């Protein structure tokens, strides 16, 4: 599995539809995208990181809630634009939040929160 700069993974037990927005450290929206993913599908976006710093990530599901959640927001820090990636994992694993936003470098960094 190849990662791009922003990745949305559907590890929930149902289809999910929604949108993702990423705002860069300067306050500019660098990604606004919708997604429609079946179970175990993913969607990737490149050319998002222009600089290191804090990126605000907002996710909203439009057709369903997972364990009662349909939105998530988190500010993440990107220190290495060549290696680090943002991952959003929608999942039904009770050990984690239903929509997890985190920074990592490999698919394992994101999918460890899935069921």
Image (cartoon, rainbow, N blue to C red):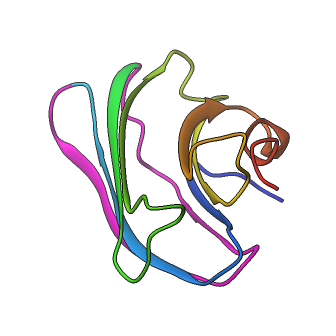
Residue 40 at x, y percent in the picture: 76, 73
Q: Nearer the viewer, residue 53 or 63?
A: 63
The residue depicted at 34 percent of the width and 31 percent of the height is 55
Q: How many marks?
A: 0
Residue 4 at x, y percent in the picture: 62, 51
Quadrant in the picture for the N terminus: bottom right
Q: Nearer the viewer, residue 101 or 70?
A: 70
Quadrant in the picture for the C terminus: bottom right
The residue depicted at 25 percent of the width and 25 percent of the height is 25
The residue depicted at 52 percent of the width and 65 percent of the height is 66
Q: Tell me: 96 left or right of 106.
A: left
Residue 71 at x, y percent in the picture: 35, 56
The residue depicted at 68 percent of the width and 31 percent of the height is 104
Q: Quadrant of residue 50?
A: top left
Residue 74 at x, y percent in the picture: 37, 34
In the image, residue 20 lies in the stretch drawn in magenta: no
In the image, residue 36 lies in the stretch drawn in magenta: yes
Q: Tell me: 22 left or right of 100.
A: left
Query: Magenta region: which residues?
Result: 26-52
Q: Is residue 35 visible?
A: no
């Amino acid at each position: 599995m190849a990662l791009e700069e922003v990745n949305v993974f559907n590890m929930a037990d149902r289809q999910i539809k929604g949108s993702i927005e990423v705002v860069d450290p300067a306050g500019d929206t660098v990604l606004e995208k919708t997604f429609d993913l079946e179970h175990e599908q993913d969607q990737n976006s490149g050319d998002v990181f222009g600089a290191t710093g804090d990126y605000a990530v907002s996710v909203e599901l439009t057709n369903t809630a997972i364990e009662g959640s349909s939105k998530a927001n988190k500010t993440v820090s990107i220190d290495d634009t060549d290696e680090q990636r943002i991952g959003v994992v929608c999942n039904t694993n009770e050990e984690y939040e239903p929509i997890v936003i985190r920074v990592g470098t490999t698919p394992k960094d994101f999918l460890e929160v899935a069921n």
